[in-house]
Every structure is written in C-alpha cells, then in structure tokens.
Image: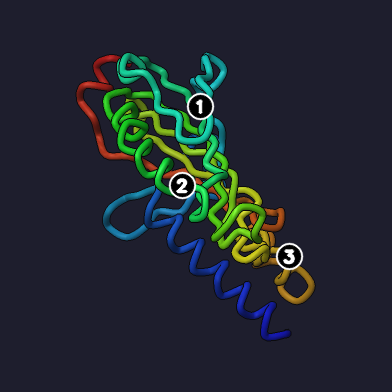
Amino acid sequence: MSHSRLRNLLLTCALAVGVCTATVAPASAVTTEVTVSSSLTVVGPFAEPGFAATCTWHTFGEGEQPTWWLAFTDPLCVEYSKRDITLDNGGALTFLLAEPSRIAASLVTCHYYQKDHWSVQSSTGAVPWVAWDGQYWWDKARQRAGIRLANFRINNNPVGIGDAVIALRPGYPDLADALAAYGTAAGESGLTSTLPFNLRCALGG
C-alpha cells in the first residue's frame, strides 16, 4: 500500500472515530447497531429521520442569517451554503458572523434537520483545504440523531469510511462489508446514535 493510500486510510479511521464520538440510530438498523460500553449508546448506519417527509426547507446563502422566528419552528429544516469560507475576500469573516444566529435557531426545536455545503480555502479559486456536504439531524422526542458527510476531501483527497471500505475490499472483504453500512463512496461517512432523554420533547411528541 502506498504512503498516500496509507495516509488516507489513517485519516479515514480518525474521521470515523471523531464522527462516532461527536454524534448521535434508527430502530430500523438493528442488525448493524453497536452498543458502546456502559453508556448504552446505540450506534447504527445513517438514515433519514422520520419527520423528514414533513420538512419545509429554509435555504440560506453565504453568510445569510435565519430570521429569529425560525427558532420556534418544529420541525426546523434548514440548508446553508458555506462554500465561501475564504481569507482573501472576507468570506471567512462573513461565515463567522452568521454562525451564532444559525446555531441559536437550532437550540429550542425538538426536531431539527440541517444540510450544508462546506468549502474552506485560502483564496477564491484555490484548492480547498477541506470541503464536504453535510446532513445532520436530531429527534429529541425519540432520542435519536444522525450525521452524514459526503464528498469529504482534504486538499482534494477523499477521506471517509467509504474510502476504508474501498481500500479493504480486495484483501478483507468481511471487514469491508461490516464498515459498508457506514459509508461506501469515496469521502462518505455516516451514522446515527441515541440521544439523552429530553422530558419536554418527549411530552410534546
């Protein structure tokens, strides 16, 4: 295995560990769920939330902030463009100024689904340092949440569980099959996990 392939595989493993520790899995994924230690955290493949079919999507451009009343929308489904995180044109500053209100809008709702599109680069037109398309959701009433990163690239090199599956498939097909539930394409990683009990959302349904 080449040094670059090994590097990408190591990055993939690091990403997988990071996603597992930072996220939160549907009951439909019973055959591939994993219980982690005494915390009883159940991790499974990424799946769309049950409320996704009822979403009314609110779409925002670069640096655009959501209106205040969206904080009281349930379910809240938003899509953000974050491709212009660039140093030479003020895009990074615009992004940073918009993020607090975007985060604040998500805090109250019990059902949240966010899609976003990231690209971080030194200057306009440069190869991105890091880029990806993300999906993140939580359902506090049902104590589940999920994350999926697609097209994840570092310096234009794909990094994800899917890359590990592709690399392992020739020599370790059983291991590749086990990981494939969490990503099959280059730059893809996704999972769901349990959330702590939330009384307000549980009572609200």
User: Alpha-carbon neighbours of circle 2 within 10 Å: few (<14), some, or many (≥20)?
Assistant: few
Where's the N terminus, which quadrant?
bottom right
Q: Are marks 1 and 2 in contact (CB under 8 Å)?
A: no
Q: Is residue 119 above or below residue 153?
A: above
Q: Which of the labelled discs sits on residue 158, or is there none?
A: none
- Separation of marks 2 and 3 at Cα, in angstroms: 38 Å
Q: Are marks 2 and 3 in contact (CB under 8 Å)?
A: no
Residue denoted by label 3: 166
Q: Name which residue lies at 33% across and 24% down.
A: 110
The residue under label 2 is which amino acid type? Gly
Numbered circles on residues, count: 3
Mark closer to the observer (2, 3): 2
Image point (50%, 63%), residue name = 15
Q: Which mark is residue 90?
A: 2
- Quadrant, the C terminus: top left
Q: Position of residue 19 (x, y in %)?
A: 45, 55
Local SS, label 1: strand
Nearest to the eye among marks 1 and 3: give it: 1
Picture quarter containing residue 127?
bottom right
Answer above or below: position of 19 versus 99: below
Using the image, tell me which numbered label, if any, was put on residue 60. 1
Q: Earlier in the sequence, mark 2 or mark 3?
A: 2
